Image (cartoon, rainbow, N blue to C red):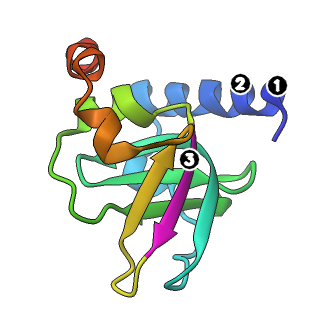
Amino acid sequence: MGQKLIISLLTATMAMAFGAGPCAADICRGQQPASGVAVHGPVLAIPDGSSLCVATGASPSAWVRIPLSHLQTDRPALMAAAFGKNATCFVDAQGRGSCVIEGQSLAATLHEPEMVDAAFGWR
């Protein structure tokens, strides 16, 4: 996706998140991927501390909610680590994903000291 499209999508997502629009869980309406599939795109919504939404197209109907496997965190930490960044998530047989954010494991990114500090900015 082009940088202008990503900026437009981020702007729309922020407006919905902070305005009177639908909650983040309602935004991600894309079809759940089959096991073994990799989903690529920018992270444009974080409904909670255990899932994220990857935009595979411009419309929220193409934003895929990825429940995260083996990840215990909170929403502010996920916002700091993943929101607005490009992700590749690999879906397992249970429909849960392991994600790489801009080339680094999401789990590893969450444990970096600067991410822990950045999470406080999202509270």
**Residue 47 position within the rendered picture, expressed as x and y whole percent measured from the top left:** 34, 48
Q: Is residue 29 above or below residue 52?
A: below
Q: CA distance from mark 2 to mark 3?
A: 16 Å
Q: In the rendering, which numbered label is found on residue 87?
A: 3
Q: Is residue 15 above or below residue 86?
A: above
Question: Disc 2, disc 1: CB below 8 Å?
Answer: yes
Q: Which residue is mark 1?
A: 4
* Residue type, mark 2 in image: Ile
For residue 115, which quarter of the picture?
top left
Residue at point 84%, 34% (across, down): 2
Q: Which residue is mark 2?
A: 7
Q: Is residue 85 above or below residue 99?
A: above
Q: In the rendering, which numbered label is found on residue 94?
A: none
Secondary structure at badge 2 equals helix
Quadrant where the C terminus lies? top left
For residue 5, which quarter of the picture?
top right
* Residue type, mark 1 in image: Lys
Question: Circle 2: is it few (<14), some (14-19), or many (20+) Cα within 10 Å?
Answer: few
Q: CA distance from mark 2 to mark 1?
A: 5 Å
Task: Pick whichever, 29 or 57, lies toward us.
Answer: 57
Secondary structure at badge 3 equals strand
Task: Pick whichever, 123 or 86, lies toward us.
Answer: 86
Residue at point 48%, 52% (across, down): 53
Residue range of the region highlighted in magenta in the rendering: 86-91
Residue 40 appears in the figure: yes
